[in-house]
């Protein structure tokens, strides 16, 4: 049953049953026509070395999920069984799927929020449609289009990027079972010709099954040799190509011309070593843009799914095109209560005059704040990233260590409940480590005070819940 409300009656019920039957027929056709792809996906997984480099070992949370997935995969006999596993909350860990009422208030709120945020895409938003490979139990039909609760969430990542650029080659770090890839490759604004998904082999199995079920006409390449990478330079640009790359082969892709690299959600769940690996990878890659939507300002004593101090950790060689904290995105609170930041950056150095202007602005305004909010703290962290100014970093650290950060400016009214109490964010540990690495810039007494605070904060970090499902 796909509706949580009272079923329609009369002619409406007949129409609904017709669309359900038609959808089931289409789904049956897909599964019959691509059955050979399922075995090919299995072969890709079990012929791929399963042990990634030490820096890329999965976090506590993903150790559980990759272990379950690898054990379950050999028991699947159909694409549908694999897809249902991937989309079931609590089994795969990929997203927050759930049953929906396609005509209910929650869905209406999602449409409204997207229209407010992206008015120039209003026609596209009204035509949003998810993959026919989605099970009916986690889908709904609205205005003859199949929708899911995650369709709106994943679409926003695409809209945030398409507000500024038209990428031909998109590369996603941690593509899960392929939901963002499907939206990128079917949206009616602009579709890239090549989509690269880098992930654990078990995740790539689900992505291959889901995307081949959803896009049977796309060309698929599984990276298991350097020759496969070299073949990407001669791709037919008129045909969409999906490249599946096990993360242990990620460095083979560094010389590829890429327009956009994305990561949504998983950077915050990685270890410090993994964050460093991927930031170096992005830096060395040929990409011109990077998009991130990840945790920011999680409380140090309640890290939820997070395990590191700060991510992404970009160098000063990137200019911000857009950045938003979660409450600036009306659609966000409908899906998660987590503290997040969405940011799109473009490769390029900031000239010295602009750096000086940023410093002046900090000392003239932000340094005088009684307490940082998450938004002003984000602004301060970006100023530190670009200018590498030790005194600004010390000022920010001292303020946050003393007073914490506020969830939001008290003059802003939010339509959902939140804590008004200031708290200590996890990034304070990143700042402490960064300052101690610049020991030449401070007196020994200042360094000693920073070190003592860092040790105290680290004790909180060590006993805090982290990496939770």
Image (cartoon, rainbow, N blue to C red):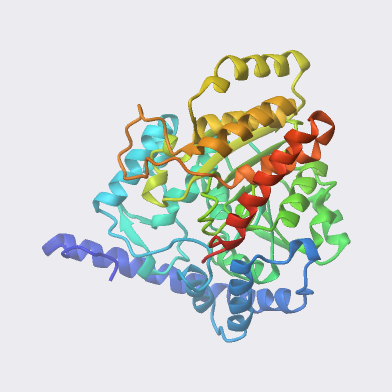
Count of numbered badges drawn on the protein: 0
Front residue of 438 and 149: 438
Residue 428 pos. (x, y %): 62, 42
Residue 200 versus residue 295 in the image, above or below:
below
Q: In the picture provided, is 108 more to the left or to the right than 248?
A: left
In front of the other: 91 or 146: 91
For the point 71% across and 25% down, the residue is: 391
Q: Nearer the viewer, residue 435 or 277?
A: 435
In terms of depth relative to the viewer, which is nearer, 100 or 142? 100
Spot occupied by residue 79 in the image (x, y as percentages of width and height): 54, 76
Residue at x 55% of width, y 22% of height: 366
Answer left or right for 143 relative to 74: left
Report the residue at 37% width, 33% height from top: 116
Where the N terminus falls, by quadrant? bottom left
Locate residue 144, reporting x and y percent: 32, 54
Q: At 38% across and 64% down in the image, what residue appears?
A: 98
Q: Is residue 45 left or right of residue 6?
A: right
82 sits left or right of 359 in the view = left
Residue 170 in view of the camera: no
Q: Quadrant of residue 378?
A: top right
Percent from the top left, x then y, of residue 311?
65, 46
**Vertical placement of residue 191 versus 84, above or below:** above
Residue 41 visible in image: yes
Quarter of image, res 459: bottom right
């Amino acid at each position: 049953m796909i509706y949580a409300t009272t079923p329609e009656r009369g002619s409406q019920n007949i129409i609904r049953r017709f669309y359900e039957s038609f959808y089931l027929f289409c789904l049956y056709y897909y599964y019959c026509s691509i059955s050979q792809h399922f075995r090919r996906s299995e072969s890709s997984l079990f012929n791929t070395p399963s042990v990634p480099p030490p820096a890329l070992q999965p976090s506590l949370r993903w150790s559980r999920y990759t272990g379950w997935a690898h054990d379950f995969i050999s028991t699947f006999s159909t694409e549908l069984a694999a897809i249902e596993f991937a989309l079931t909350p609590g089994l795969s860990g990929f997203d927050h799927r759930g049953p929906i009422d396609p005509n209910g208030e929650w869905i209406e709120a999602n449409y409204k929020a997207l229209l407010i945020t992206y008015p120039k895409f209003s026609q596209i938003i009204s035509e949003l449609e998810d993959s026919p490979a989605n099970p009916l139990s986690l889908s709904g039909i609205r205005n003859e289009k199949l929708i899911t609760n995650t369709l709106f969430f994943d679409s926003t990542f695409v809209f945030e990027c398409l507000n500024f650029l038209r990428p031909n080659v998109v590369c996603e770090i941690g593509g899960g079972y392929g939901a963002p890839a499907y939206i990128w490759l079917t949206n009616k604004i602009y579709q890239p010709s090549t989509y690269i998904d880098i992930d654990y082999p078990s995740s790539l199995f689900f992505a291959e099954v889901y995307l081949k079920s959803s896009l049977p006409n796309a060309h698929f390449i599984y990276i298991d040799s350097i020759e496969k990478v070299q073949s990407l330079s001669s791709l037919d640009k008129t045909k969409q190509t999906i490249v599946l790359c096990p993360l242990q082969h990620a460095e083979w892709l560094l010389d590829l011309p890429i327009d956009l690299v994305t990561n949504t959600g998983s950077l915050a769940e990685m270890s410090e070593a993994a964050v460093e690996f991927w930031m170096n990878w992005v830096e060395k890659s040929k990409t011109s843009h990077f998009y991130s939507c990840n945790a920011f300002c999680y409380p140090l004593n309640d890290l939820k799914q997070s395990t590191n101090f700060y991510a992404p950790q970009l160098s000063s060689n990137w200019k911000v095109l857009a950045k938003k904290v979660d409450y600036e995105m009306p659609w966000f609170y409908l899906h998660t209560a987590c503290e997040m930041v969405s940011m799109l950056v473009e490769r390029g150095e900031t000239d010295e005059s602009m750096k000086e202007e940023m410093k002046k602005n900090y000392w003239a305004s932000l340094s005088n704040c009684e307490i940082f909010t998450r938004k002003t703290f984000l602004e301060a962290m970006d100023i530190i990233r670009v200018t590498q100014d030790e005194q600004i970093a010390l000022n920010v650290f001292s303020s946050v260590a003393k007073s914490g950060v506020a969830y939001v400016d008290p003059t802003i009214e939010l339509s959902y409940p939140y804590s008004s109490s200031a708290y200590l964010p996890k990034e304070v540990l990143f700042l402490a480590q960064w300052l101690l690495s610049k020991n030449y810039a401070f007196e020994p007494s200042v360094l000693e005070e920073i070190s003592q605070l860092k040790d105290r904060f680290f004790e909180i970090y060590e006993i805090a819940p982290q990496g939770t499902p």
